[in-house]
Image (spheres, helix red, strand yellow):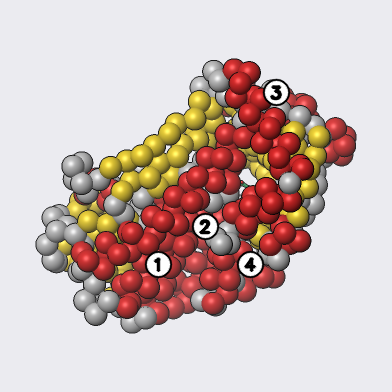
Amino acid sequence: MQVAVVGGGPAGSLLGILLHRAGLDVVVLERRSVEHVRGRIRAGVLEHPSVTMLREHRLADRVDREGMRHEGVVLSDRGDPLRVDFQGLTGHGVVVYGQTELQKDLFAAIEAEGVEYLDEIEELALGDVTNRPVELRYRRGSREETLLADVVAGCDGAHGVTADAVPRGVRRTYERYYPFGWLGIMAETAPVHPELIYARHERGFALCSMRHARLSRYYLQAPLDTDLGAWPDDRFWDELRRRIPPAAAERLETGPSIEKSLTPLRSAVGEPMAYGFLALAGDAAHSVPPTGAKGLNLALADVVDLAEVLLEAKDPGPEALQAYSDRALRRVWRAVRFSWWMTTVLHRFPDDGPFAERIQDAELALLRSSVAARRAMAEQYVGILP
Ligand code: FAD
Ligand code: DHB
């Protein structure tokens, strides 16, 4: 059976590895160069089940050696910190490990095991996905190529082309846009706190994260039309200090940023996640705002579900792929809800007024006073679904 995987980010790379190991003919088609995909800075947190899965597939050597195990996070409400003890509440933690590093590990396996990964492919066009074989046409350098596939996996992210192969009348998109983005920087400084700090503040949300002992990642809620040029590093550090707990602000080590970007926030799910001989996985199928740290984890979990369906069915076709879609969507919606909730509780919504602020006060008071509320949050953050 020939599988074409469109998109070679974390979802497409992992799927390529799993199917190749099982003996299927699989080709990963990626639009950008390997160097570009390897260098992209994105997510930073691996849930407990993602780490377990990577270990089961012998892809976690470096995650285990170099990842930072975190047993809790701090939620700060206008400067007042509350620690949520993941380990005590759930028996599990998360691992802080950059998507950049995970992508390097996946590339190492792809190269070592001979998975076919074609980068810099252009103008990919999908033929009719309801009939087999599905024809994929693309250009690589000066050559026009055609690939015939029994199954196509759309792993081409939020701006890919495969989702468009599902007709409008079949695919329904459920979405919510948030009226702000995240202004993020990376700096070669010591993280301000050993654990992540998610901070609610009247000036807007802030997040203190990290990649390792000398690499920090910070984000500020910012308007969608923010001009990066208007945010020199000093302004960023001053604003961050205002939004985080005073004790953390005093300790904050500042330095020149090595990256600065603005990410819009969106929740979106397209249903179904399969049509004909096409299945969608990862950001090609859904987007979540980064607040719950779910995007990368959802992409990995989709791929594991899809690989299982493709390997278990004798001749995987529309019925098996529909079963994948049904199974994945149950999991996806729970992560979409959690990311929406974290976003809604912690950000300042410019148009929502005092009622919404009082609701946020009550949400944070509940977390502070109720072990049950903290446990529910902790279970969802570490990714164990009771
Ligand atoms: P992607 O990583 O987007 O990979 C898709 C791949 O498909 C890309 O390599 C792309 O080049 C390729 N592609 C696209 N179109 C085509 C085409 N036509 N033909 C061939 N290839 C194509 N998540 C978090 O949890 N926390 C974060 O802090 C966070 N920050 C983010 C910041 C940014 C700027 C972005 C864009 C995403 C962020 N995410 C974050 C989300 C997380 O990175 C994604 O959920 C994750 O990358 C999903 O993996 P994926 O493989 O599904 O998609
Ligand atoms: C990071 C990003 C997130 O969205 C998040 O919730 C936690 C950490 C990060 O980039 O480090």
Amino acid residing under circle 4: Val
Q: Residues within 10 Å of mark 1 (few under 14, many from 20)?
A: some
Confirm whether residue 229 shows in the render: no
Is the CB–ligand 1 distance for label 2 below 8 Å? yes
- Element carrying mark 3: loop
Which label's residue is closer to the chain start, 1 or 2? 2
Q: Which residue is mark 3?
A: 202
Q: Residue 273 appears at what percent x and percent y?
A: 31, 54
The Cα–Cα distance between marks 1 and 2, rounded to whole angstroms, is: 13 Å
Q: Quadrant of residue 117?
A: bottom left
Decide if residue 217 is on the left or right side of residue 154. Answer: right
Q: Which residue is mark 1?
A: 305
Which residue corresponds to the image point at 56% horizontal and 20% vertical from the top-left? Answer: 352
Q: Which residue is mark 4?
A: 63
Q: Residue 34 appears at what percent x and percent y?
A: 44, 58
Amino acid residing under circle 3: Glu
Label placed on residue 297: 2
The Cα–Cα distance between marks 3 and 2, rounded to whole angstroms, is: 30 Å
Which residue corresponds to the image point at 66% horizontal and 25% vertical from the top-left? Answer: 358
